[in-house]
Image (cartoon, grey):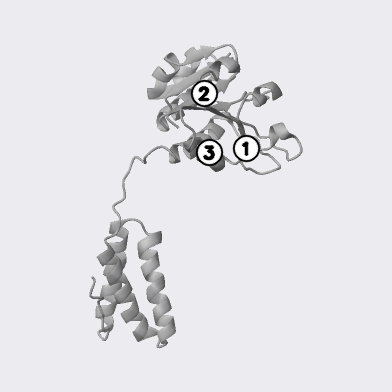
C-alpha cells in the first residue's frame, strides 16, 4: 500500500464529517474523497479542529466510480454480512488490512451513509467487504467510530506509533531469570517448579514486557527480595 484514500459516500452529519477529517490526520490518510456529501462542509469545519484543512482540500465527486479511479484495491464496509449473499461475504478489519498491506499503489477505504450505508451497486464496485464484529443485537456503529477502527487496522500495517519503547537488554532479562531461580529455590523446594518459575519470568521479561524500564523494575524487586531473604545464591550465566 503506497497511498491510502478515504472515501465517504453521502455523509449526512456535519459532526461525523468533522470527526472523520480529524481521523484522516490521526492515521496519516493521504487523500480524502467525498461522494455527494449531504452534510454542510462549513458546519463540519467547527468539528474538524486542527484538521479543517482536510475538509478544505478534500476532493468532491458525484459518484463512487469517480472516487475509485486509479485505485488498486478498495475496501467497502457494512454492518450487514452474510455467508449466503456473495456480495456480503466479509473479511475482518485486520484481514482487510493484511491484504491491503501487500497491495501496491493506492488503497481506498469506502465508508457509507449513516442512515442506509452503501447500496448493493456501490458494494459491487469494491474489491473487498469488511465488517466490524459487534453485538448482534445492535451491530451498527456510528460512522466516525467505524472509520476509526478501520483506519487503525490499516495504520498498523503501514505506519509507526507516535511513541517508541526501548526494548529490554538481554543481559537484564538474564538477571531476572537468575534472581527468579534463586528466590524460587528458597521458597518452593522443588527443582522442576524452580525451573518452570525461572523460565516463566524470563519469558515474561523478554516477551510480554516490552519496555526496558519495566523489566528493570522487575529486576529491582527480585534482587531486593533476594537480599531481604539473605540466603539466595544467584547463579549468573556466563553469557550475561
Q: Earlier in the sequence, mark 1 or mark 2?
A: 2
The kind of secondary structure element at disc 3 is helix
| Residue 188 spot, x, y in % from top left | 41, 85
Q: Which residue is mark 1?
A: 131
| Residue 29 spot, x, y in % from top left | 43, 28
Query: Which is more toward the observer, 117 or 18?
Result: 117
The kind of secondary structure element at disc 1 is loop
Q: Earlier in the sequence, mark 1 or mark 3?
A: 3
Q: Which residue is mark 3?
A: 99
| Residue 227 spot, x, y in % from top left | 24, 79
Position of residue 146 relative to residue 207, above or below, is: above
Query: Which is more toward the observer, 239 or 218?
Result: 239
In space, the residues marked 1 and 2 are separated at their CA atoms by: 21 Å
Mark 1 vs 3: CB contact within 8 A: no
Q: Quadrant of the C terminus?
A: bottom left
Q: Which residue is mark 2?
A: 71
Query: Which is more toward the observer, 232 or 29?
Result: 29
Q: Is residue 70 visible?
A: yes
Left or right: where does residue 210 sit relative to residue 237? right
| Residue 124 spot, x, y in % from top left | 67, 25
Mark 2 vs 3: CB contact within 8 A: no
In which image quadrant can residue 1 be found?
top left
The kind of secondary structure element at disc 2 is loop
- Which residue is at a point 29% across and 59% down the rendered structure image? 168
Crowd band around label 2 with a 10 angstrom C-alpha radius: few (<14), some (14–19), many (20+): some
- Which residue is at a point 24% across and 71% down the rendered structure image? 239
Amino acid at each position: 500500500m503506497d497511498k491510502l484514500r478515504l472515501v465517504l459516500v453521502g455523509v449526512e452529519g456535519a459532526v461525523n464529517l468533522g470527526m472523520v477529517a480529524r481521523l484522516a490526520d490521526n492515521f496519516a490518510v493521504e487523500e480524502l474523497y467525498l461522494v455527494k456529501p449531504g452534510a454542510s462542509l462549513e458546519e463540519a469545519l467547527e468539528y474538524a479542529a486542527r484538521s479543517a484543512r482536510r475538509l478544505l482540500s478534500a476532493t468532491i465527486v458525484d459518484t463512487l466510480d469517480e472516487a475509485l479511479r486509479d485505485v488498486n484495491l478498495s475496501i467497502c464496509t457494512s454492518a450487514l454480512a452474510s455467508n449466503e449473499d456473495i456480495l456480503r461475504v466479509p473479511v475482518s478489519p485486520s484481514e482487510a488490512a493484511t491484504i491491503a498491506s501487500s497491495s501496491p499503489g493506492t488503497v481506498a477505504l469506502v465508508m457509507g451513509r449513516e442512515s442506509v450505508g452503501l447500496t448493493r451497486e456501490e458494494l459491487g464496485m469494491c474489491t473487498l467487504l469488511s465488517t466490524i464484529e459487534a453485538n448482534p443485537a445492535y451491530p451498527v456503529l456510528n460512522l466516525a467510530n467505524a472509520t476509526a477502527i478501520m483506519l487503525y487496522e490499516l495504520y498498523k500495517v503501514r505506519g509507526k506509533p507516535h511513541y517508541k519503547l526501548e526494548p529490554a537488554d538481554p543481559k537484564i532479562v538474564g538477571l531476572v531469570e537468575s534472581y527468579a531461580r534463586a528466590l524460587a529455590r528458597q521458597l518452593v523446594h522443588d527443582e522442576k517448579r524452580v525451573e518452570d518459575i525461572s523460565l516463566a519470568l524470563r519469558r515474561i521479561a523478554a516477551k510480554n514486557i516490552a519496555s526496558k524500564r519495566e523489566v528493570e523494575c522487575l529486576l529491582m524487586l527480585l534482587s531486593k527480595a533476594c537480599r531481604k531473604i539473605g540466603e539466595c545464591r544467584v547463579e549468573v550465566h556466563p553469557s550475561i
